[in-house]
């Protein structure tokens, strides 16, 4: 069969690119190796609840995800998290995370929540940021340490970056994780400027029913335009033909690769993209009315030197999303724990997760209250945007630009998170039109 376009990878990037192409009237085929599309935005069912198995919210920055949801008729399902705030678990106790910050970098080092978590000494050191001269830095970690001190790095930034990117700030390029965050002058002022230019309201939002509703809507839209999303096809080879590409027995004039497998499929002589951390997500559905009070708000991030738990983050999903609390019913709670730090394999199972949840929520949780659980192991799902990875991405982009009718997209080139992936995938599709 001959198509106008083939997209390899049926994650959000591939589906968004395919939708863009299908809307332009191109007959488009998506090939996805798993038995269901969605990639890191897949769904699963736990104790009768349809839940996100991976991503559960999107950053509102740029407005690009909201615009897509609007086009798909999902605008009325967009929800803002409950305003409970979140916490960081430290060796000497728990503290609130700054409500106004960026990746944990406080916009106001003297704010009460920041002082409580950093202590007076830490807050005073962080305030030096306002007067220090410009400090060049090679990584996000170095930048924060130099300008605001070790406490901001260890108690705020490292736990958040570990939770979002499964990486250490010392390994991350500043512009890859915080575009627009200047390395010149005050960090706090830069964070304030960035937040002021972001849309009003919450920095993240979700969808009533779960983020995976987006996957269903994208697939339906691609199909309604004559496209096809075919699952269970692992693409191992892409051959140039005289007028396009031959992929898994299908032919097309245009090829969009929404997976890091692109490097091998196109035979690009670049280094290897970052393989991504191994992240395990344990979801617990609990009958635990003692959690109704949301003891740790919408969730807890864990500082690296807090050794009493193995988890790096906990999301109290029923405290975060009112629609989910209603779906779960009175006294029932959904708690998600994530495991896996850069360079470390953390074995995680339901018993460890139950113990960690008890510690992090400061509420004893018994196995008898467990209504259901799921353990999902993610590999290659969160590429760490280190300087080395960014160099590979630049090489790949240059090589692909020289190929007619070919584009790459996805978190591995655009950065993690839907707010980065969606606009990049749309641009990739437009580049082959
Ligand atoms: C546990 C977890 C939680 C997250 N939470 C959030 C969040 O709350 N908010 C947020 O914005 N982001 C979050 N993210 C990140 C976000 O989900 C990803 O950045 C985004 O979904 C990546 O989309 P993608 O299409 O680039 O890649 P993927 O979702 O990885 O999709 C790539 C797809 O390509 C397929 N594929 C790969 N190779 C081949 C091949 N050779 N042939 C055929 N198919 C192939 C894969 O099976 C996969 O389905 C989270 C990620 C994880 C893992």
Image (cartoon, rainbow, N blue to C red):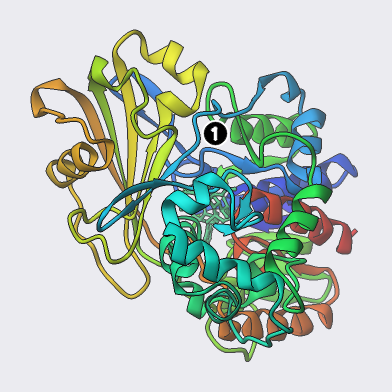
Secondary structure beneath dot 1 equals loop
Whole-percent x and y of residue 420?
70, 56
The answer to whether residue 3 shows anywhere in this view is: no
Q: In the image shown, does 362 or 255 lie closer to the viewer?
A: 362
Q: Is residue 231 left or right of residue 61?
A: left
Q: Which residue is painted at 36% across and 9% down in the image?
A: 329
Quarter-of-image position of residue 76: top right
Q: How would you rate the neighbour count of disc 1 (Cα within 10 Å): few for under 14, some for 14-19, many for 20 or more?
A: many
The answer to whether residue 113 shows anywhere in this view is: yes
Whole-percent x and y of residue 215?
60, 36
Q: In the image shown, does 86 or 65 lie closer to the viewer?
A: 86
Q: In the image shown, does 37 or 273 lie closer to the viewer?
A: 273
Quarter-of-image position of residue 147: bottom right
Q: Is residue 258 left or right of residue 49?
A: right
Q: Is residue 41 left or right of residue 346?
A: right
Label 1 sits on residue: 212
Q: How many marks?
A: 1
Whole-percent x and y of residue 94?
33, 47
Q: Is residue 12 above or below residue 402?
A: above
Quadrant of the image for the C terminus? bottom right
Q: In the image shown, does 85 or 235 lie closer to the viewer?
A: 85
Q: Which residue is painted at 20% across and 42% down in the image?
A: 359
Q: Which residue is painted at 20% across and 30% down in the image?
A: 363
Whole-percent x and y of residue 20?
82, 46
């Amino acid at each position: 069969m001959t198509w106008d376009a083939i997209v390899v990878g049926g994650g959000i990037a591939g589906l968004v690119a395919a939708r863009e192409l299908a809307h332009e009237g191109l007959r488009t085929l998506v090939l996805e190796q798993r038995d269901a599309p969605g990639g890191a935005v897949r769904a699963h069912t736990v104790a009768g609840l349809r839940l996100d198995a991976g991503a559960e919210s999107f950053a509102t920055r740029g407005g690009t995800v909201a615009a897509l949801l609007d086009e798909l008729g999902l605008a009325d399902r967009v929800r803002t998290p409950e305003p409970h705030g979140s916490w960081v678990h430290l060796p000497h106790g728990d503290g609130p995370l700054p409500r106004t910050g960026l990746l944990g970098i406080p916009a106001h080092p003297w704010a009460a929540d920041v002082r409580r978590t950093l202590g007076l000494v830490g807050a005073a050191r962080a305030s030096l940021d306002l007067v220090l001269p410009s400090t060049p830095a090679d990584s996000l970690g170095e930048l924060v340490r130099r300008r605001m001190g070790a406490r901001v790095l260890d108690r705020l930034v490292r736990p958040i970056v570990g939770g979002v990117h499964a990486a250490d700030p010392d390994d991350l390029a500043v512009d890859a994780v915080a575009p627009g965050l200047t390395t010149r002058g005050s960090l706090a002022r830069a964070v304030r400027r960035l937040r002021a230019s972001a849309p009003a309201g919450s920095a993240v939002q979700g969808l009533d029913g779960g983020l995976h509703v987006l996957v269903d809507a994208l697939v339906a839209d691609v199909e309604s335009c004559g496209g096809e999303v075919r699952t269970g096809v692992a693409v191992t080879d892409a051959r140039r033909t005289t007028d396009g590409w031959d992929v898994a027995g299908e032919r097309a004039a245009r090829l969009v690769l929404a997976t890091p497998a692109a490097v091998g499929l196109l035979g690009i002589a670049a280094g290897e993209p970052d393989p991504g951390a191994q992240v395990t997500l344990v979801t617990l559905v609990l009958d635990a009315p003692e959690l109704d009070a949301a003891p740790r708000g919408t969730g807890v991030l864990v500082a690296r030197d807090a050794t009493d738990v193995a988890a790096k983050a906990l999301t109290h999903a029923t405290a975060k999303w009112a629609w989910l609390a209603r779906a779960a019913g009175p006294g029932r709670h959904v708690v998600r724990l994530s495991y896996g730090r850069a360079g470390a394999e953390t074995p995680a199972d339901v018993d460890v997760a139950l113990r960690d949840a008890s510690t992090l929520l400061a509420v004893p949780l018994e196995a008898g209250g467990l209504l259901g659980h799921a353990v999902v192991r993610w590999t290659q799902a969160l590429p760490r945007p280190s300087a080395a990875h960014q160099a590979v991405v630049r090489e790949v982009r240059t090589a692909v630009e020289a190929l007619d009718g070919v584009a790459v997209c996805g978190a591995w080139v655009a950065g993690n998170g839907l707010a980065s992936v969606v606009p990049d995938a749309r641009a990739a599709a437009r580049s082959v039109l």
